[in-house]
Amino acid sequence: MTLDAKIPAGPLAEKWSKHKFNLKLVNPANKRKYDVIVVGTGLAGGAAAASLAELGYNVKAFCFQDSPRRAHSIAAQGGINAAKNYQNDGDSVYRLFYDTIKGGDYRAREGNVYRLAEVSVNIIDQCVAQGVPFAREYGGLLDNRSFGGSQVSRTFYARGTNRAAAFIRRLLRIKPPDTSWQS
């Protein structure tokens, strides 16, 4: 059996940009003909479902938990790493790529990790636009910290799990649980 990761061929820095350029586009009139299944309703799944629905696709979101409110993004204490270089400490796409490969004991697929590092800046901007309650400094800029094995401060995080839970509920239009029977 041969494992095929379906990573495009070519130099590491150009693989996904070239692949994205060569993809066929979907006519806006045909988008409603496609059903997109999103597995997971955490921050990534919820944002993907919302973005695809805004583009006109029929989206069905599934979660393994009994409720989307129990997604891992709500319980996570870490954050999201991005090569935004807010602290002017020399962060770059390549440094994020290297830290991620090294943190995965060199077992990650390099092409996919490089693409993740490339789009990490845009992912943070999209999350902010969709209302993710990231922690902010007193001046209003996004706050970040050094977390895990990263060499620089690049982890963007939300202060308090209630804010993250409120965002997921708002994104997926979920009503808060009825807890009146508990009192």
Image (spheres, rainbow, N blue to C red):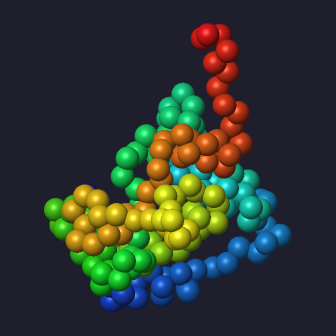
What residue is shown at x 55% (from left), y 68% (from top)?
140
Q: Quadrant of residue 50?
A: bottom right
Closest to the observer, 10 or 39:
39
In this picture, residue 165 sits left or right of residue 177 = left
User: How far from the left and from the top, in percent, is residue 167?
Assistant: 61, 48
Say which quadrant the C terminus sits in.
top right
What residue is shown at x 23% (from left), y 71% (from top)?
151
Closest to the observer, 107 or 70:
70
Say which quadrant the N terminus sits in.
bottom left
Closest to the observer, 22 or 110:
110
Residue 131 in sight here = yes
Closest to the observer, 71 or 56:
71
In this picture, residue 49 sits left or right of residue 44 = right
Whether 104 is drawn above or below 46: the answer is: below
What residue is shown at x 45% (from left), y 72% (from top)?
120
The residue sitting at the left extreme is: 105
Whether 161 is drawn above or below 25: the answer is: above
User: How far from the left and from the top, in percent, is residue 91?
Assistant: 32, 80
User: How far from the left and from the top, in percent, is residue 57?
Assistant: 73, 59
What residue is shown at x 36% (from left), y 69% (from top)?
154
